[in-house]
Image (spheres, rainbow, N blue to C red):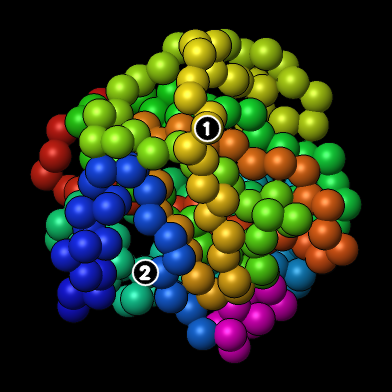
Amino acid sequence: MKTLTARQVTDYRRDGYLYPCPALSAAEAARALEDLARAEAHIGAPIPKADMKWRGGAYVYLPWVDALVRHPRVLDIVEDVIGPDILVYWATFFIKDANSPAFTAWHQDSTYFGLSPYDHVTAWVALSDADSAAGCMEVISANGAPRQYRHAAARLEHSINGAGQVITEPIDASRTAMMELKAGELSLHNTMCLHRSAPNRASHRRVGLGISYVQIGRAHV
């Protein structure tokens, strides 16, 4: 079912991102946080402090995450930008505990995934409020001309990205947008979207699930 307006789709294709998009109800988001708490109790540690294997691909071992990546409202939004026959390529928890120094430097997801063509989109589903104080995603518009930038593994301390990768070319950071989301909303960003996030300076935990989708039938290598 079509969810986005023609203007929203146009904005996404020009900028490489779109927000906010209503996805989950408040009750669904709250229930997901409860399910996450049970999963962390079973693991024996919060996701950010647990073994890296628990951070990604949780739809394989957590039924509620499997249901979330297939949520009809999430899929309807994604279909509007990449078409039908959608495949979940990966999903990753992005969690910053309250007053955490965790951050990400300017980067592009395409650097990690290496997929071609570049029609891979990530739906970042907020399970708790993600405002600027909590370290929401900050993005730069591609202005209709996205390209791959050079990166280096800087091994930055407190970086959420494992290798602490950062863009090494000059970028125009004068036209950024803060993708603030309320619990239950999602944002979309293309794999070539330039983005970063600051530490969480809020008193609440910032919890998001980044779900990466591609279209079946396209060549992805």
Q: Look at the image and say whether residue 194 sits in the magenta stretch.
A: no
Dot 2: element: helix
Q: Please tell me the numbered disc located at residue 74.
A: 2
Q: Quadrant of the C terminus?
A: top left
| Residue 112 shown left or right of residue 114 in the figure | right
| Region rendered in magenta | 26-34
Q: Closer to the observer: label 1 or label 2?
A: 1
* Residue 2, picture quadrant: bottom left
The residue that appears at 38% across and 74% down in the rendered structure is: 71
Cα separation between marks 1 and 2:
31 Å
Residue 218 seen in the current view: yes
Q: Is residue 191 visible?
A: no
Label 1: how many Cα within 10 Å (few below 14, some 14–19, many 20+): few
Q: Quadrant of residue 23?
A: bottom left
Q: Which comes sooner in the sequence, label 1 or label 2?
A: 2
Regarding mark 1 in the picture, which secondary structure is present there? loop
Residue position marked by numbered label 1 in the rendering:
174
Q: Answer left or right for 132 relative to 89.
A: right
The image shows residue 88 at horizontal and vertical percentages of 35, 53
In the displayed structure, 123 sits above or below 66; it is above
Residue type of the residue flagged with mark 2: Val
Q: Is residue 29 magenta?
A: yes
Which residue appears at 25% of the width and 29% of the height? 145
Residue kind at label 1, given as amino acid type: Ser
Please name whichever residue, 54 or 204, is drawn nearer the observer in this view of the structure: 204
The outermost residue toward the front is 174
